[in-house]
Structure formats: C-alpha cells, structure tokens
Amino acid sequence: MTPSGTNDSRIYTLSEENPYMAVIKLGVPLIAGMFIMVLYNWVDTFFIGLMNDDYKLAAVNLAYPVMMVTVAISNMVGTGAASLIARSLGAGKKTLASHTVTAGMVLTVLNSIIVTVLGLIFLPDIVTLLGAKTLTYTYTHQYVFVILLGSVFTMGNYTFGQLLRSEGSVRYSIAGMIVGTVANLVLDPLFIFTLRMDISGAAIATVLGNALGMGVSVMLYLSGKTLLRPSVRYIRPTAEILKEIFWVGVPASLETLLTSVAYVINNNLAVSYGELTVAAVGVAQKIMTVGNYIYQGFAAGVQPLMGYNYGAHKYPRMRQCLKSGLIVVSVIELFVMLVFAVTAPRLIDIFTDSSVVIDTGARVLRTLMFVLPFVGAVSMCRMSLQAMGKPMYAFVITLVRQLFLYVPLLLLLNYVFGFGGMLWAQPVTEVIMMAASVGLLLFVINREDKSQNPL
C-alpha cells in the first residue's frame, strides 16, 4: 500500500505526492529517456559528418520538417488519447481508459499508411518545398524517401510512448527510446560505411531504431505489466472516444504543423546565406535538443499530473504542480544555457571540420540558447491545457506564438538586421509567450475552480 492507501504507486504519484517530487519523479525519467533521444539525433549527425560532406549535413537538416510532420500526426492521436486516458483515470473510468489505448494504436497505424502513400506520391514537390537546391536536392530526396517508407515505425514509437506516459508508466515509456537509440548507434556505421549506403543508410538506421522502440512498447502492453491493457474487443473506437481524441488531438497536431512551417521558412531564409549556413544551423539545432528535451520532458511529466487532477477536480494541486514544474525547469535550463555559452565552438566541432560551419554554428547556438529559460514555461502550459481537455486554448498559444509573433519577427528582423536578426526572432518570441501562456493557464484553472466551488 502507498501512504494514501492507493494500491498503485503510479496513482499515488499523480494524486497525492509532494508536487516537487511528483514533477521530478515523472519528469526526470522522461528526460533521461530523451537524452537517449539526443544521442539518437546526434548519432546520425555525427556519422554523416564523418563523410566530410557538409552538404549532406545540410540535407538532413532540410529533411527534418518531414519528421516533424509525422510527429505532428502522431501527436494528434497521442496527445488526444493521452489526455482522455489521464482524465478517465482521474475520474475512476478505467475501462474507458483501456478502450482509448486500443483506439490510439489503431488510429496511429491507419494514419501512418496515409502519410506514406501521399508522401511518396508528392515526394519531388516536398523536397523542393523543403528548400533543397542543386547541391542538396539528391541527398534530401534519398533521406526523405526512406523516412516516408518507415512512417509507421516513427509514428508508432512516438504515440505508444505517449500512451504509456498517460497512465504514469514513465519508466516503461523510455524503454523504447533506449532500445531504439542503441540500435541506431550500431546500425548507423553499419549501413553508412560498411554497406556503403551513404545518407540512405542513415535514414534506414533511424527507421529500424524506431521499429525496435515501437516493438518494445507493444511487448510491454502484451506482457500485462502496464496499468492499462489494449484488447481486441476495444479495437473499434466509440464515437465518444473519437470525438475526444480529435477534439484535443487536432489542435495539438496543428501546433506541430505550424512549427514545421516556421522551420521550413527559417531554413529557406538560411539558404539565402549559403547552403553551408543551413548545415551550421542544423548542427546548432541538434545541440539545442539537449535543452529542448529537458523542458519537453518536464512538460510531458506534468501533463498526466494536470490531467489526472483536473479529472479529480483538485485545482489547488494543479496550481502547485504548475509552480513546481516552472521552478524546476527554469533553474535547470539556466545551467544548460551557461554550458552552451562556454563550450559552443567545441560542441559544433564534434560534428564537422569546416571552420565556416563551426564559426557560424557557434554563433547560432549562443543566440538560440536564450530561449531555454522561457520556452519551457510555454511548453508546460500548452501541454497542461491539452491534458485538461482544453485544446483550443493550447492551440491559441501556438497560433499566436508561431504565426503572429515568430514568423513575422523572423521575416522582419531578417530584413532589417540580416542573419543575426533572424536568429534573435525566437528568443524574443519566447519571452513574450512565457508571460502570456502562464497567465492564460492560471486564468483557466481559476475559472474552473470557481465554477466547481462557488462561494
């Protein structure tokens, strides 16, 4: 028995544990797993860098929005299902939660088939839209082709991990990350150099790593170790489940798609300063994933906390969990920012010998790092609103952030100040959005509290 008398420690963590401890307990394992994902991203970049061709590095960066689109569609199902699962558990509706897990798996497979078919049909147009030019077009085409073929594994690995986290099984959710990354570490040099498959080999290793990660999640569900279990009798989702998944999931998916659009615009602007600049930006952004995964890990850890306690109408605990999460993530990100400031050139040097890429990449990293103390709060508020079943509020945050602030600032600052101005668009955006996001989330929580507990 847990201290509360609850017979499952996962439920105790969600419902009663000290907010700081709950945030750390749910967030740190995710961050550990996400650091494995950092290694996953770095492995591809490192081994491609060993080819001594910076245009291949640029091609991988140009292809990245395709991965973001697959994640966006995965996010539609994963976030929508995870929100419903957490709220159902908080309300004591375990059968509904189990039914939702099964529906999430089925929808993910169906969506991946659509992505693969449409992506391959429009592949040449996609590569051009990504900003690939003469020296990067062929490499980008090769990489994207393989990624599209393996969409089911990329999307399955991402979504199934979200489903596991939604029930508080954080350690299980990172098992797939670890297995996939170790596989990628082994397979990258095998496919790239031993089998001489070049940049296509890097993409194949990525797909196979995701396939193994997805397989681990499926095995955990089938083993009966999870709190919730998918079942054949739940394979046909009800209208209620579909409505809830898409009500929360579609805005979440649009958020990631908007981010992808902003990423493409950013890359197309960077190309105007030379294709090696794209390589430098790409390497810097890969290194930034260290800081990004820290705040994303804590945001993902807070998500089931907020969803469960919203379902249980524990509004004071929601405010405590939010405060604890914001303090923890801000302190850690300030430390990461300091490390980046001191070591930027050496970090870029890990991936390339080009002095141009190293100098430009260090400049990019030392500018982008200023987002870290602020963007974590934005992500945490957005995911909390999704967990509460308030997707439109979360979508408004992203809409304002990407379309009304970041993209206009990106274009304006690039026009006025050139490359340096373009880099500062995101830090300026995140400072403004931090204040707006925290204020919006507290407003929603306080309003819900008053409606449930009128004076």
Image (cartoon, rainbow, N blue to C red):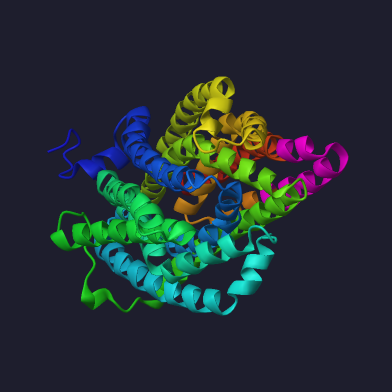
Residue 84 in picture, x, y percent from top left: 39, 60
Residue at the spot 43% in from the left edge and 38% down from the top edge: 298
Q: Nearer the viewer, residue 429 or 114?
A: 114
Q: Nearer the viewer, residue 91 or 234?
A: 234
Image: 6 above or below 146: above
Residue at the spot 78% in from the left edge and 37% down from the top edge: 421
Residue 43 in picture, x, y percent from top left: 41, 44
Q: Is residue 131 left or right of residue 167?
A: right
**Residue 421 is a magenta residue:** yes
Outermost residue on the right side: it is 416
Number of marks present in the image shown: 0
Image: 94 above or below 444: below
The quarter holding residue 39 reads: top left
Residue 56 in picture, x, y percent from top left: 56, 52
Residue at the spot 53% in from the left edge and 57% down from the top edge: 68
Q: Is residue 274 left or right of residue 442?
A: right
Residue at the spot 46% in from the left edge and 57% down from the top edge: 198
Residue 453 in picture, x, y percent from top left: 46, 44
Q: Is residue 370 visible?
A: yes
Quadrant where the N terminus is found in the figure: top left
Looking at the magenta stretch, what is its main secondary structure? Answer: helix
Q: Is residue 399 visible?
A: no
The quarter holding residue 37 reads: top left
Image: 376 above or below 270: above
Q: Is residue 414 left or right of residue 213?
A: right
**Residue 73 is a magenta residue:** no
Q: Which residues are magenta?
A: 401-424
